[in-house]
Amino acid sequence: MVFSSLVFMFGFLPAVLVCYFLFDKRFSNYLLLAFSLVFYAWGEPVYVFLMIFSICANWICAMGISCAFRFKCSGRHTPPPNEKFKGMARCWPHHQSSYSWVF
């Protein structure tokens, strides 16, 4: 299925939009993930397993980077709940112009 096909425009896309707006917003990302995998499986089902592996590997790496970033900046493993996003301002390197400090 391609984006310009009639099946996508008059079948798949309306189904995604209806489900997206009917379901609770807490589940919207999971719903879009599921529909994305169905969309890619429609074209080549073999690569869906590769996508699932890539999604899981990227999520694990992102959690590791997030944990290391919080530990490095705050001196503790996880900040208290009320400081979860306030700690980002303390750690932001105002003196650097690039994002090389992340790596």
Image (tube, rainbow, N blue to C red):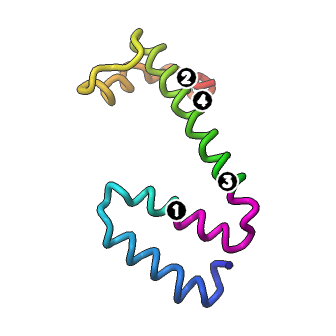
Q: What separation in Å lies between label 3 and label 1 (alpha carbons)?
A: 12 Å
| Three-letter code for the amino acid on which mark 2 is drawn | Gln
The one of 93 and 51 positioned closer to us in this rendering: 51
Asked if the magenta segment contains residue 45, the reply would be: yes
Q: Secondary structure at mark 1?
A: helix
Decide: is 27 above or below 101.
below
Expressed as whole percent of the image width and height from the top left, the position of residue 38 reads 59, 68
Point out the stretch of residues depicted in magenta: 34-48
Q: How many marks?
A: 4
Label 3 belongs to which residue?
51
Q: Secondary structure at mark 4?
A: loop
Decide: is 25 above or below 43.
above
Expressed as whole percent of the image width and height from the top left, the position of residue 74 reads 39, 13
Q: Secondary structure at mark 2?
A: loop
How dense is the environment of label 2, judged by Cα within 10 Å: few (below 14), some, or many (20 and up)? few
Q: Which label sits on residue 34? A: 1
Q: Secondary structure at mark 3?
A: helix
Label 4 belongs to which residue?
98
